[in-house]
Image (spheres, rainbow, N blue to C red):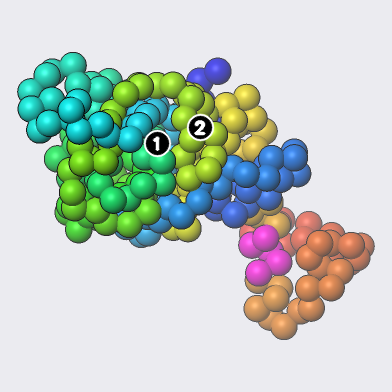
Amino acid sequence: MSLSDSTRTQLKTVSSATLCTALFKRGLRNQFIQDVRPLNPGLPNMVGEAFTLRYIPAREDLNPISVFQDRKHPQRQAVERCPPGAVFVIDSRKDARAASAGSILVSRLMVRGVAGVVTDGGFRDSPEIARLAIPAYHQRPSAPTNLTHHQALDIDVPIGCGDVAVFPGDVIVGDGEGVVVIPAHLADEIAAEAVEMTVFEDFVTAEVLQGRSILGLYPPTDDGARADFAAWRRANGR
């Protein structure tokens, strides 16, 4: 099931927090990638289907610098194969001692039209990546080459990233707080519900800023709160 343009557009307008609540209502408690932060929180939401790369611990006899001369090296192949509109998700085993990638590879992903990149490890050249027009999320900066601790192995397979299972084709959404993973078969209904939740939360925020109590309002257990929301929605074209 591919991500529709309408669902992609909806997901660009909602927060990771709201998405996590919608997922929690369906029993999914562990969809927010842990310890991963945006290099540039000011960029628009990152939305796309997961394309994955899996690292294992590097073994010294298999990871000299010369391995990059092989055009079939999995890391290089993954960068060239990640589809436009997808999110490149890297399983670095939460190990930021070596870089998952650097600014040149992320730049290549950007010009190929990739929607964003996520690792539960670290990026090198992070100041340069932060200036690129592609959302990028990592644990912390890491200068050493990936070969010192990571061996690229599998492309587009199920992985773990920040303690979350990520399957190829899962829908990945990142905002200024972090990254949430939506199972592909739930993406349309989660997106629609999150948009509705956002409208209501905007109403609640406006009321609270005017001095209204949250009791009976959030959640709307009072009939008056529901009536006020309906009137606010009509008045604001929401």
**Do we see residue 107 in this rendering?**
no
What segment carries the magenta color? 201-205
* Quadrant that contains the N terminus: top right
Residue at figure coordinates x 41%, y 41% from the top left: 93
How many numbered circles does the render carry?
A: 2
> In the rendered image, which quarter is residue 104 located in?
top left
Q: Nearer the viewer, residue 231 or 4?
A: 4
Residue type at mark 1 is Asp
The reply, left or right, for residue 136 in relation to residue 213 is left
Residue type at mark 2 is Val
Label 2: few (<14), some or many (≥20) within 10 Å? many
Residue at figure coordinates x 84%, y 62% from the top left: 220
The x, y position of residue 3, in whole percent, is 50, 26
Residue at figure coordinates x 78%, y 73% from the top left: 214
Q: Is residue 117 above or below residue 42?
A: above
Specify the farthest residue to the right. 223
Q: Is residue 159 above or below residue 202?
A: above
The x, y position of residue 34, in whole percent, is 50, 51
Q: CA distance from mark 2 to mark 1?
A: 9 Å
Residue at figure coordinates x 12%, y 19% from the top left: 70
The x, y position of residue 211, in whole percent, is 72, 83
**Do we see residue 40 in this rendering?**
yes
Q: Which residue is mark 2?
A: 166
Q: Nearer the viewer, mark 2 or mark 1?
A: 1
The x, y position of residue 108, in whole percent, is 18, 34
Asked whether the beta carbons under mark 2 and mark 1 sit within 8 Å of each other, the answer is: yes
Mark linked to residue 61 = none
Q: Which residue is mark 1?
A: 91
> In the rendered image, which quarter is residue 38 located in?
bottom left
The reply, left or right, for residue 164 in relation to residue 29 is left
The reply, left or right, for residue 67 in relation to residue 210 is left
Q: Is residue 220 above or below residue 166?
A: below
